[in-house]
Image (cartoon, rainbow, N blue to C red):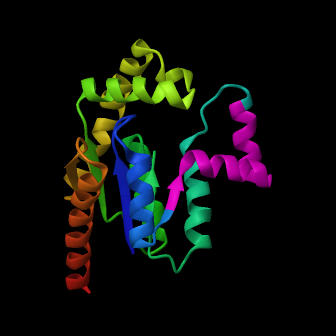
Amino acid sequence: MLNIVLFGPPGAGKGTQSQKLIDKYNLIHLSTGDLLRSEIAAGTALGLEAKKLMDNGLLVPDEVVIGMIENKVKENPHAAGFIFDGFPRTVPQAQGLDKLLQDNGTEISCMIALKVDDEELTKRLLLRGQTSGRPDDQNEELIRKRVEEYNTKTRPVADYYAGQGKFCAVEGIGEIEDIFQALCKQIDSLKEKQEEKK
């Protein structure tokens, strides 16, 4: 099973690239935002718990999010693999995800980070803000804050996977297709290693 954490700051191009990877490798997209919305819409116990917290402006705790991911993994036992988008964001989340996958007989294959410098990110998000209508993409100060938050909070997650020998970075600046090819190269060499282990 190919389980990839696609990593990168806001504006790095994760959405664009994850869709291309899903199509090429037949992966299931696990976006925690989408999961939360679908569990809430379905009125599941986890969804109701999450809604109650969100309505009070509180963050949904890790165990609830991990529970939702576990449901999705169990629903798709024959999947070619999963691509994790926007999760894990912290080391405890990464540890929780490792345990959940182990319990289900699989593991994270690798974390691939899209590297884009802060100035380029700010430029991209301001541009996106002109078309997306998202207020958080239109305010330069807010954008810089989001990028800084990513750098301080989520960087340790990259170190966590690096410690397991499961981290690699790909240049996130350039043509979309070139970046995609660089990602595929990493994934293909990973698949070869997996095959050799069998």
- The picture places residue 191, in percent across and down from the top left corner, at 26, 75
Task: Check the picture and name the quadrant holding the N terminus.
Answer: bottom left
- The residue closer to the viewer here, 15 or 153, is 15
Give the residue furthest to the top.
141
Q: Residue at 62% x, 72% y: name it.
A: 75
Please tell me in which quadrant of the rendered image residue 4 appears.
Answer: bottom left
Q: In this rendering, is residue 149 above or below 91?
A: above
Task: Check the picture and name the quadrant holding the C terminus.
Answer: bottom left
**Would residue 154 be seen by someone viewing this image from the given angle?**
yes
Q: In this rendering, is residue 67 above or below 50?
A: below
Q: In this rendering, is residue 194 above or below 73?
A: below
- The residue closer to the viewer here, 123 or 41, is 123
Q: In this rendering, is residue 114 above or below 78?
A: above
Please tell me in which quadrant of the rendered image residue 105 appears.
Answer: bottom left
In screen coordinates, is 141 left or right of 162?
A: right
Main SS category, magenta section: helix
Q: Which residues are magenta?
A: 29-54
**Would residue 44 be seen by someone viewing this image from the given angle?**
no
Give the residue furthest to the bottom.
198
Q: Residue at 23% x, 54% y: name it.
A: 178
